[in-house]
Image: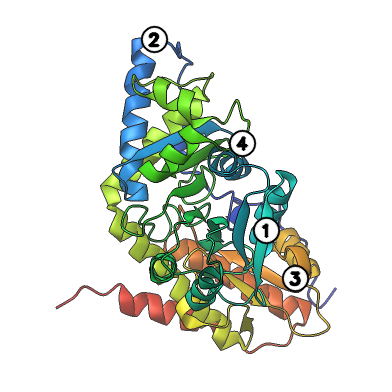
């Protein structure tokens, strides 16, 4: 017989490419650390582990204050931030930058908080001027907290937290500043102390390169004082008993011991690479990705270059093409997972995660799979995205003179 036989899907072959913006790929050495035997979580060996992890988390948040570790997801860390600092009927200013901002707002509403919301088109980060103006209007200081998502994982837009703090200060407003650093921690620069953040919320399965299961709060002294004086009814997520136990390296409730082993190993990896080098690596891979998208003639969902995220890039599909059908093709043909569109952009975008355990070749393979998928799916585009990314990676990997 003459002619070419169709190439069957090869999803079962090779290692899976997990290119969603979380959960992210877990490094092999972190997986091996999780395989250690379980130890007594009230014994001296565990106390050493607990003290090590709690202290070594501080440079990742860039804080000298307390970092609290809970067994749970990023959602649990959101909840801990709210219930420890706010009471029912308290007024909160939130900015709708994407689906995760929407979900945080929905949680706050269920706790009986009154939400003052600033809308956006989901294609940019928080406008500090809009925050300043809204706070200036609150002359009686009824707004108790400003809650913003640092890196909106649904859209690929990052907000400038330092400028938001300056806007709050310019408005002379005493509200707490709570930020969602779920996908930004360990991926792009987080400066809890310098930015005057009162609670930074994060978790294990994004930039920290762990499986899901750990929620994190970095807290200011101001937030701790508010928590001691009030907040909402809480138990498992109460900061005070956890801090008391943490003083000796222990936890108020049974911790996820083996995830703490994994976290200790991941933190060692950050120390070996250097946190600034981690951020530079993410920035570089993100820029290469954006160059590929531009060369394909496709559109980045994030419109403002100043808001571009180094965690992920959300790509708009051309009219008449469904992003989820494209993602399914990519998974079936190339054993690669891309992030789906969430909320009101479901089916309209696919998200490329360039976060965590990644290097040039990982990204090259990711972009090659996407470009082949665009061809197979018949999606209008221009070829050359992979070449554009590779040229940039090659140019920026040359040793300096």
Q: In the depicted view, which residue is nearer to us: 110 or 47?
A: 110
Marked residue nearer the N-terminal end (1 or 4):
1
**Which mark, by number, is residue 115?**
1
**Label 4 to label 2, Cα distance in Å?**
32 Å
Q: Tell which circle, 1 or 2, labels the residue nearer the N-terminal end.
A: 2
Task: Say which residue label 2 marks.
Answer: 43
Q: CA distance from mark 4 to mark 3?
A: 34 Å
- Circle on res. 236: none
Judging from the image, what secondary structure is the residue with disc 3 in? helix
Give percent across and percent down for residue 75.
63, 44
As drawn, 14 above or below 386: above
Labels 4 and 3: the sequence-earlier one: 4
In-image side of 265 versus 97 (left or right): left
Counting residues from the start of the chain, the first of labels 3 and 1 encountered is 1
Q: Nearer the viewer, mark 1 or mark 2?
A: 1
- Contact (Cβ within 8 Å) of mark 1 with mark 4: no
Residue at numbered disc 3? 345
């Amino acid at each position: 017989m003459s002619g070419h036989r169709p190439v069957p899907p090869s999803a079962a072959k090779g290692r899976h490419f997990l290119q969603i913006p979380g959960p992210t790929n877990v490094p092999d050495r972190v997986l091996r650390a999780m395989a250690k035997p379980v130890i007594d979580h009230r014994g001296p060996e565990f106390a050493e582990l607990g003290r090590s992890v709690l202290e070594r988390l501080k440079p990742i948040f860039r804080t000298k204050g307390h970092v609290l570790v809970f067994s749970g997801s990023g959602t649990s860390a959101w909840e801990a931030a709210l219930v420890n600092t706010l009471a029912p009927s308290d007024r909160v200013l939130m900015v709708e930058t994407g689906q995760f901002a929407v979900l945080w707002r929905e949680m706050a509403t269920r706790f009986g908080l009154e939400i003052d919301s600033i809308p956006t088109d989901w294609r940019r980060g928080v406008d500090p001027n809009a925050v300043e103006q809204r706070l200036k209007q609150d002359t009686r200081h009824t707004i108790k907290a400003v809650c913003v998502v640092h890196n909106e994982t649904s859209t690929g837009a990052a907000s400038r937290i330092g400028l938001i703090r300056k806007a709050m200060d310019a408005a002379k407003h005493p509200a707490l500043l709570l930020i969602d650093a779920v996908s930004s921690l360990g991926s792009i620069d987080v400066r809890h102390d310098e930015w005057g953040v009162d609670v930074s919320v994060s978790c294990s399965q994004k930039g920290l390169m762990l499986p899901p299961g750990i929620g994190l709060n970095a807290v200011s002294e101001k937030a701790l004082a508010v928590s001691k004086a009030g907040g909402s009814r809480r138990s498992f997520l109460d900061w005070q008993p956890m801090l008391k136990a943490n003083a000796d390296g222990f936890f108020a409730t049974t911790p996820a011991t083996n995830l703490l082993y994994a976290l200790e190993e991941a933190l060692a990896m950050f120390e070996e690479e250097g946190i600034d080098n981690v951020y530079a690596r993410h920035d570089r891979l993100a820029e290469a990705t954006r160059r590929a998208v531009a060369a394909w003639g496709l559109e980045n969902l994030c419109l403002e270059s100043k808001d571009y995220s180094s965690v992920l890039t959300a790509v708009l599909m051309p009219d008449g093409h469904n992003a989820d059908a494209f993602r399914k093709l990519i998974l079936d043909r190339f054993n690669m997972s891309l992030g789906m569109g969430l909320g009101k952009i479901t089916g309209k975008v696919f998200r490329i995660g360039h976060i965590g355990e990644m290097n040039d070749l990982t990204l090259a393979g990711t972009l090659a799979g996407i470009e082949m998928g665009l061809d197979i799916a018949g999606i209008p585009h221009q070829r050359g995205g992979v070449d554009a990314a590779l040229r940039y990676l090659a140019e920026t990997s040359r040793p300096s003179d």
